């Protein structure tokens, strides 16, 4: 377990796996000292060095890394994961957080630490509802979050833009502009946050009214309407909408609708009546334990609902094969007034970063995810919590819970034109900088970045090189499927 009370600053590529921690409260440096800290890191690890990427003959086999992840996952779901990843280089990139973490660990690092997302590709940003019922834009996936190098998140975001732009058939000049704009947005935002008061940084967020002000791209009428349409669509993704999509009334009882293998109710997973009773009792105990991780006033809210059904659900790309449960709860507002609450319980294992930056300070991986999410997001789900479960197979597993759909929406990357992707990348860059500024030394990072484009240009070169590697890795997966080494299938989304 990492001791985050031991102050340390590590610069360069040889940082040990136990050296990465967030800044300590005891380390009260002056602004000038923090600026010198950032410039000293820049002197030792030049910004231009971040453009380097060479696979090398000793690079771990990316498919072996993916297969290693699969050892702890549901075996019958792994072919779905590989089938989804094989569908395109961008889909492969989404699922390949582990191989990229291994590659990033071999690149230069500044030694300036933040709460990192660990998987900051552009499809892991989106809109959702704040507790005040405003539509906000933020990072929305924290499965891999851990204190780590800020530049790893920037490189993953930049590379995801390059990979997505290639998949959309954009010209090299367009791709370069998109990546440069996103990294520049991160750099300018971090320098802006370095000038702000701490509380102002903590309260900063992007909502539906201000999101277009964060980009230098002038969106046309069609693009502006698309943004408004996406916001309206997100607002329909609430608990009632989830009820209409995922549930059915049978003999007057609300039940989750089966859609195997993507949605399998717990009653269909059980071997018999006795097994079903045991599973349902276990799930109620899980809900009770999870309840204890909520704030007292939110426990009161949760207590107004009762669990009525549960199903295993397949979501995403990289997460496929982990155990994810959809929990349907109903309030007590009368027989004719259905009052649903959908929760998602998502299995949490060690972050893909832990092998390279050290283990989390939290023994429970679900708690690691929740704390990281609360550190990075401007606002978080009121039902965010965690739990540890003793499974029927005798293995202990950690989960984090949140609402399944609460005005959640994501961009349709495949339909973006260059101008839209550039604007979206800039908003993602600003958002990532805001998330990092909340936990890391924003003044030191801003000093490291500086005012010119040296870092932007370097990361653009990295993104291009790594996108080439991603294409080779994707083809390796396609070949492994064709040869029969890896089984894959692609069910309906």
Image: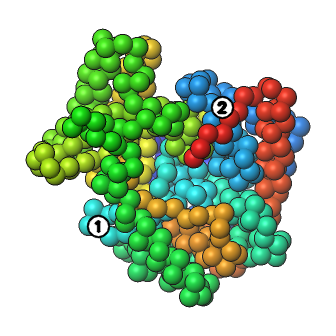
Q: In terms of depth relative to the viewer, which is nearer, 420 or 44?
A: 420
Q: In terms of depth relative to the viewer, which is nearer, 195 or 204?
A: 204
Q: In terms of depth relative to the viewer, which is nearer, 163 or 481?
A: 481
Find residue 70 and report its horizontal and vertical position in percent: 62, 28
Q: Residues within 10 Å of mark 2 (few under 14, many from 20)?
A: some
Name the residue located 18 percent from the left edge and 42 percent from the top edge: 305
Name the residue located 64 percent from the left edge and 60 percent from the top edge: 157
- Residue lying farthest right? 57
Q: Which residue is mark 2?
A: 79
> Which mark, by number, is residue 144?
none
Q: In terms of depth relative to the viewer, which is nearer, 298 or 117?
A: 298
Quadrant of res 292: top left
Find residue 476 and report its horizontal and vertical position in percent: 83, 39
The relative height of residue 325 versus residue 404 in the rendered view (above or below) is above
Name the residue located 65 percent from the left edge and 70 percent from the top edge: 416
Q: Is residue 469 left or right of residue 258?
A: right
Q: Is residue 300 visible?
A: no
Find residue 487 and report its horizontal and vertical position in percent: 72, 28
Q: Is residue 107 left or right of residue 310?
A: right
Q: Residues under labels 2 and 1: Cα distance?
A: 38 Å
Of callouts 2 and 1, which one flags the residue occurring earlier in the amino acid sequence?
2
Label 2 element class = helix
Q: Is residue 382 visible?
A: yes
The relative height of residue 245 versus residue 413 in the rendered view (above or below) is above
- Residue lying farthest front? 251
User: Do the numbered discs 2 and 1 sit on residues whose CB atoms are within 8 Å?
Assistant: no
Label 1 element class = loop
Q: Which residue is mark 1?
A: 133
Find residue 240 and report its horizontal and vertical position in percent: 30, 54
Q: Residues within 10 Å of mark 1 (few under 14, many from 20)?
A: few
Quadrant of res 270: top left
């Amino acid at each position: 377990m990492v001791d985050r009370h031991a102050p340390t600053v590590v610069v360069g590529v040889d940082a040990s796996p136990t050296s990465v921690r967030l800044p300590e409260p005891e380390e009260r440096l002056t602004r000038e000292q923090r600026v010198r800290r950032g410039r000293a890191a820049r002197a030792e690890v030049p910004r231009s060095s971040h453009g380097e990427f060479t696979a090398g003959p000793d690079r771990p086999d990316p498919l072996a890394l993916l297969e290693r992840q699969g050892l702890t996952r549901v075996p019958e779901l792994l072919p779905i994961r590989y089938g989804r990843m094989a569908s395109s280089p961008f889909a492969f990139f989404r699922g390949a957080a582990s191989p990229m973490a291994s590659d990033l660990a071999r690149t230069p690092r500044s030694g300036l630490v933040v709460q990192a997302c660990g998987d900051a590709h552009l499809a892991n940003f989106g809109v959702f509802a704040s507790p005040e019922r405003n539509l906000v834009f933020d990072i929305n996936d924290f499965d891999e979050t851990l204190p780590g190098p800020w530049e790893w998140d920037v490189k993953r975001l930049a590379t995801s833009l390059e990979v997505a732009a290639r998949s959309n058939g954009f010209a090299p000049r367009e791709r370069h502009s998109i990546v440069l704009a996103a990294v520049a947005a991160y750099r300018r935002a971090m320098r802006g946050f370095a000038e702000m008061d701490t509380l102002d940084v903590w309260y900063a967020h992007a909502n539906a009214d201000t999101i277009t002000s964060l980009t230098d791209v002038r969106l046309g009428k069609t693009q502006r309407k698309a943004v408004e349409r996406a916001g309206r669509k997100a607002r329909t993704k609430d608990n009632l909408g989830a009820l209409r999509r995922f549930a059915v009334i049978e003999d007057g009882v609300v039940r989750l609708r089966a859609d195997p293998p993507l949605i399998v109710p717990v009653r269909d997973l059980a071997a018999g009546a006795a097994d079903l009773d045991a599973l349902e009792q276990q799930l109620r105990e899980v809900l009770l334990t999870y309840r204890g991780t909520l704030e007292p006033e939110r426990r009161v809210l949760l207590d107004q609902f009762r669990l009525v059904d549960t199903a295993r659900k397949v979501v995403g790309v990289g997460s496929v094969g982990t155990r994810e449960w959809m929990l349907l709860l109903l309030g007590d507002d009368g027989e004719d007034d259905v009052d649903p609450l959908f929760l998602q319980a998502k299995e949490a294992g060690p972050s893909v970063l832990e092998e390279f930056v050290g283990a989390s300070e939290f023994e429970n991986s679900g708690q690691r995810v929740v704390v990281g999410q609360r550190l990075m997001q401007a606002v978080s789900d009121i039902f965010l919590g965690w739990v540890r479960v003793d499974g029927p197979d005798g293995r202990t597993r950690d989960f984090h819970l949140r609402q399944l759909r609460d005005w959640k929406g994501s961009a349709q990357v495949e339909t973006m034109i260059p101008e839209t992707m550039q604007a979206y990348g800039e908003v993602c860059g600003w958002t990532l900088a805001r998330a990092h500024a909340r936990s890391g030394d924003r003044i030191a990072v801003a000093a490291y970045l500086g005012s010119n484009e040296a870092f932007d240009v370097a990361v653009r070169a990295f993104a291009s090189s790594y996108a080439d590697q991603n294409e080779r890795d994707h083809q390796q997966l396609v070949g492994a499927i064709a040869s029969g080494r890896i089984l894959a299938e692609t069910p309906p989304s």
